[in-house]
Amino acid sequence: MSGPLIESTSHLTSFVASLDFPLDDFQVQGCEAVERGQGVLVAAPTGAGKTIVGEFAVHMALATGRKAFYTTPIKALSNQKYHDLVAVHGVDKVGLLTGDSSVNGEAPVVVMTTEVLRNMVYAGSATLRGLGFVVMDEVHYLADRFRGAVWEEVIIHLPESVQVISLSATVSNAEEFGDWLAEVRGNHAVVVSEHRPVPLWQHMLVGNSMFDLFVEGTSEPDADGASARVSPDLVQAIRGAEQQRADGWVRGSTRDKGRGPERPRDRGRSGGSGGSANSRDHGGGRGRGGTVSVSSGPTARADRGFTRGARPGGGATRAEVIAQLDRDGLLPAITFIFSRMGCEGAVGQLLSSDTRLIPQREGEQIRRHVEERMGSLAEEDLGILGYYDFVEALSRGFACHHAGMLPLFREIVEELFTAGRIRAVFATETLALGINMPARTVVLEKLVKFNGETHADITPAEYTQLTGRAGRRGIDIEGHAVVQWSRGLDPLAVGGLASTRTYPLRSSFKPTYNMAVNLVAQVGRQVARDILETSFAQFQADRAVVGLATKVRRNDEALEGYAESMHCHLGDFREYADLRRAIADAEKDGVRKRSAGRKAEAAVSLENLRMGDIIKVPAGRRSGWAVVVQTARTGKGAPSGPGVVTEDRQFRRLTLVDVPVPVSAAASIVVPKNFNPKSPKSRRDLATTMRIAVPHDPPPMRAKEVAQDAAQENDRIAYLRAELKAHPCHQCPEREDHARWAERWHRLKRETSGLKRKVEGRTNSVARTFDRICVLLTQLGYLEGDVVTERGERLRRLYTERDLLAAECLRHDVWKRLDAPGLAACVSTLVHEPRHEQADPSPRMPNDEVAAAITEMQRRWSELDDLEGDHGLEVTAVPDGGMAWMVHRWASGERLDAVLRGQEMAAGDFVRRCKQIVDLLGQIADAAPDTELRRTARKAIDGVRRGVVAADRLN
């Protein structure tokens, strides 16, 4: 099929001639905008081919003698794009800059992570000279609450002469984002495409049967969701499955029932047969045709029932699901499991079931390839890295992929899956971000994931991002998304996720200390303030203010009408309505005060608990017996509740949600002096001791006392009632009609007052935060008016999330007397963030010097925390020493197995944190005022960046 007509313009024509496929309309529009000298935002679904526009910008840069920077959010994507561009333009013209790799950094085309470009802009790097184009891949990442602000910083601060090409997944407010880009960058085009070039079919797997999610003809719902009608066959099958479980039927006894008339495998699918490992597809070009030759007909799967090892909640085992996908020609597949342990467990299940998805000869070739890639790793480290299971699974055609893996392992998985050499990957959602790993099918085991704070349903945007992996362009003519049904999963909710097309891009931008000193140094405080008011965050806030202000005006008009309707000829009815409301409020306040008193008693009871006290937790997921191993801490920024070990051997911190009523110790035991809450064995032993010591009956709850001021409350209410009866309006025959209008007036008045507060809060909100930051920095001596002091210059070079705390440590010589391993250990506290509730309240320290330095860091943090609270600023996270002992041992030259033995940290997490430590040590080496500390920081870098930490650096 021929593509859209392209006028014979020199650069675009030559670019298209170099491709072996025609461009789509949206690709042509984006490229034409770039050639006209415009910036452009291209928003299109995953796999639609929007990177073509970015690649054309690279082509333009080389053709016109300018530079192009191609930025990505993550190192893996940077590495992948670097190799792609090298394959087209040659190794001499393409460079790579990431946190730990620097390859040909002065090349005309450089791929880099977005943070690297931000740092260049603030430092005024000479590398920026001659820059003509910046491609910002995955620009929708600016919504990320932790790193998203970097994208806005770059867009705002790049020179006006630079054309910015922003590539985004489909978002519902692309026009709004484009309007902001045009306001900040000037001449800017917006190109939006919602068409998936590869159709996506949605399915649900119920037991051993796969059903279409939507009725025939609605593989992709309309933009308004109007045609997204859930298949009645699916609904009926789920009802039948639920009824079977309710009746206690043996699973699999009715495998031949409930089969929908249309099965996904009956539709045409590109290349590839199902079946054995010896019949894999090797198809190539875009949109290749063909259908899969597999057993067909409604009864084809009747004898394939899953009869063993069912997943909790119902459904097939992972090995059975993969086997079924293989039979039906739906591999390669990515199965998203929102758990690292789940991903590892899935690989273990396939190994246990002797699954093989590729020929044995190819498996041996993969094994040799992996062994070559592992040459840089010490043989003694392989066991703790899980290498042997890893390579065995790869040799059978499957693997897992998650952030806890060694980065080198993840890169090998990405490389092999992209090349089509392995057929199944079990991954966490981190895989969905940009990396080009094509799959014919995506399987979602659950629609709930941990978002960093709690387990929550995935959003429509996340669902679209995950399922967008299926049916990648140039590989399949259609893709398949499969959701596994389990008890409680509503097919209508799944249909809503799949059909929703409203997921707006929201800014996460906020000023930081480093940003403030860099801006003041470059343009002065007032101009910096004006620049920050151009952020997308303020742009969205201002647009929202326009809508809010309009609503306020309408409400004010409505209030006048309500006031007229509640007018009473006998007196001031608003005054009478206030009396009625005062009575209602006084009655509610009495109840509220009694409840507040009970809550205060509960809080006091928690503070009074001592080490070894055994209590009965009355509510929440943690209900049951628990023993106190850490008393409550009331210091600012610290957790308020006591730390306990529960009956199920978990360490938790109690809150008033768990203990809404006062508690007291039912018994007490001795907690060992060297007790480590992070040690599973220590928790298990203590829980056993607790169970022996607990009484048979729980302690009686303290009776709630009647509030002593109840009589005074009753007297006040009686007085108000008397005032009410004496009011002239009390005798009005239309009193209740007036009262209804008065209640409406009151509710609308309260809503309007809230809207006005929102308007006041949102106007100039980013600039006001900047002002407060500047006041604090002035107080600490980092700024003097429009002048950045020597301290401020050091802060300019520190880009960590705890930037000001790091600068304060330099200012007070906290690290001056440390050796290299000790410095690395202390710096780890500025980057380590424990997963979920794995924080160690009493982390092990390597020596007294490090312990003293970390104690001093915590004291500096406490002072900073107080200042931030006084200035109404978001507080800096407390330094966490949870990996100080490990980092010290690693930087001292210990083997990896010795460092990680007995620790809960995964090897991949350790390596990733070490890379962050190396990055921050490099910043400290640049910023430190002391020559000896700079030398120590560089030694620490050498000590940390070795072995597995250095293994995946690009050569």
Image (spheres, rainbow, N blue to C red):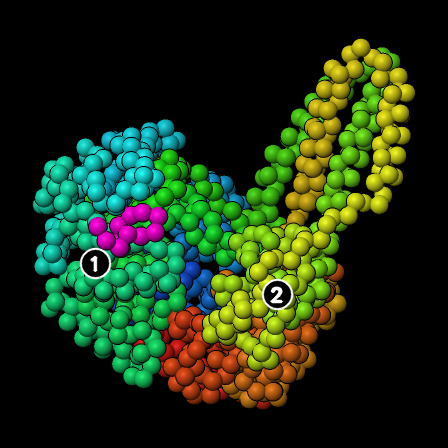
Query: What stretch of residues is rendered in magenta?
Result: 307-317
Q: Amino acid at mark 2?
A: Ile
Q: Is label 1 in contact with label 2 (beta carbons under 8 Å)?
A: no
Q: Quadrant of the N terminus?
A: top left
Q: Which residue corresponds to mark 2?
A: 614
User: What residue is shown with label 1?
Assistant: 423
Q: Is residue 314 magenta?
A: yes
Give residue 846's mark. Answer: none
Quarter occupied by residue 501: top left
x then y, percent, for residue 122 = 55, 66
Q: Quadrant of the C terminus?
A: bottom left
How far across and down, in percent of the image, does residue 256 sit? 18, 39
404 displayed left or right of 664: left
Instruction: Kindly identify the residue that appears in the image at 58 percent across and 39 percent down.
Output: 543
In this rendered view, identify the residue nearer to me: 78 or 123: 78
Residue drawn at x 55%, y 80% is: 844
